[in-house]
Amino acid sequence: MTGARYFSKLDASSGYWQTKLDEESSKLLCFNSPFGRYKFNRLPFGVSNASEIFQLDIAEIIEGIEGAANAQDDIIVWGDTKEVHDQSLHEVLSRIKDSGLKLNRKKCQFCVTQITFLGHVLSGDGVDADPRKISAIIDMPVPQNKTELQRFFEMCNYLAKFIPDLASVTAPFGCLLEKDTPWHFQAEQENAVKRLKEMVTSALVLKYFNPKDPIKVTSDSSKFGL
């Protein structure tokens, strides 16, 4: 996405229901009812590998189009200029039309300079954390049990790429999250929660990866993690 400045997001209507099943797959999804046996002709929600199948189906539709990618039923299109973006978008929409895939117009966005995708905000400046996820972390009360602490930890960990030295800051949580460890939330853990809330408010803006730039890999190890 190097240089991306214009974005569009397309949403497939009704998700999995648009994927037709072949006869053998349909037989595997047969079920009993008071009115007899029925089988699905379309991919239903709840099948263990449904997400992978749907992901591949969409990926096949847009395969080979520069400036286009998908995550499940969301398709994102980008370009460094409006002309490049529009060309990619036109090709994506043409492929979608030919495939018979239906879009949810209300959830689609076209040719914007900032867009939210997979919990990240994409713009010409780079990749930002979604403000809604930051607000959710800030608004969370101090954890009162393991379940709440685990949820807080996972929410912070989702934004790990934006928070330097996250492993060290969350280290005080480790002992409390271990199995069969009694709940003793003390000043050390409370300070870590406060520190994390401060850190997410000043989360970094990440630059898009450019394979043409010099690449440097640095690993900073510690007893808490990498």
Image: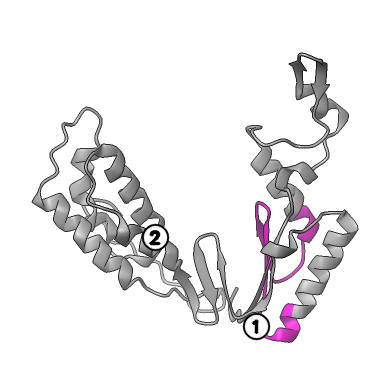
Q: Let me know if residue 209 appears in the view.
A: no
- Residue 18 location, quadrant: top right
Instruction: Name the secondary structure under disc 2.
Output: loop
Q: Quadrant of the rendered structure where residue 65 is? A: bottom right
CA gap between label 1 and label 2 equals 26 Å
Q: Quarter holding the C terminus? A: bottom left
Report the side of 215 relative to 5 (left or right).
Answer: left
Instruction: Work out whether 87 lies above or below 195.
Output: below
Whichever of callouts 1 and 2 sits on the residue coming sooner in the sequence is 1
The image's mark for residue 172 is none
Amino acid carrying label 1: it is: Asp
Q: Nearer the viewer, residue 13 or 189?
A: 13
Quarter in which the N terminus is drawn: bottom right
Q: Amino acid at mark 2?
A: Leu
Picture coordinates of residue 77 (x, y %)? 69, 70
Give x and y (percent) for residue 207.
Answer: 47, 76
What's the magenta region?
59-85
Q: Residues within 10 Å of mark 2 (few under 14, many from 20)?
A: some
State the image quarter where residue 149 is shown.
top left
Residue with the mark numbered 2 = 159
The foreground one among 209 and 159 is 159
Query: Residue at coordinates 79% horizontally, 66% vertically from top-left?
Result: 92
Name the residue at 21% across, 27% down: 180
* Residue 127 image offset from top left, x and y in percent: 49, 72
Badge 1 is on which residue?
80
The answer to whether residue 148 of the structure is visible from this angle is yes
Question: Farthest residue in the right direction?
Answer: 98
The residue at 75%/37% (across/down) is: 43
Q: Residues within 10 Å of mark 1 (few under 14, many from 20)?
A: some
